Amino acid sequence: MESDEIDKAQSAQEEPDTIFDKIIRKEIPANIIYEDDQALAFRDVNPVAPTHFLVIPKERKGLTGLRRAVKSHTNILGHLLLIASQVAIQEKLDEGYRVIINDGKHGGQSVYHLHLHVIGGKQLSWPPGV
């Protein structure tokens, strides 16, 4: 993770309206690669790999980060993972990919709207971000 993103995460706070809400409402353009009634997938504007897209729920319902997940979020969490897999297949990430959820400032979360990063298209290093 670039230090710029770490800096953003250190000062980020939960907001009633995030950049992702604006993308969902089509107020901000995004390169959308998948959409259904519950989720949206779009290319990251600062990719860290040849393929890097985000998968987000269209409605937050209090799900600003993974630590906020409760039993009522079970269906949307499963749906987001399924969409990540389906779009990875669509993007031809046949050799593999990584799904990342940043949570909180130490996790590098800079937007408080749960989102999955899906990255691939090259050999990824291990361990990530240590």
Image: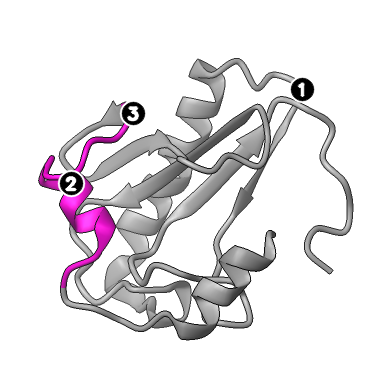
Label 3, label 1: how far apart the Cα atoms are: 23 Å
Q: Which residue is drawn at 41% across and 52% down?
A: 78
Residue behind mark 2: 24
User: Which amino acid, by three-letter code, is at mark 3?
Assistant: Asn
Residue for badge 1:
95
Q: Is residue 17 left or right of residue 86?
A: left
First in residue order: circle 3 vs circle 1: 3
Q: What are the residue bounds of the magenta stretch?
A: 17-33
Q: Which of marks 2 and 1 is nearer the N terminus?
A: 2
Query: Residue shown at 36%/83% (left/top)?
Result: 13
Question: Residue 37 is drawn in which quadrant?
Answer: top left
The N terminus - image quarter: bottom right
Residues at marks 2 and 3, CA–CA distance in whole angstroms: 12 Å
Look at the numbered disc 1 and give the secondary structure of its residue: loop
Query: Splitting the image into 4 quarters, where does residue 54 fall?
Result: top left
Q: Disc 3 marks which residue?
A: 31
Q: Position of residue 80 (x, y in %)?
A: 40, 47
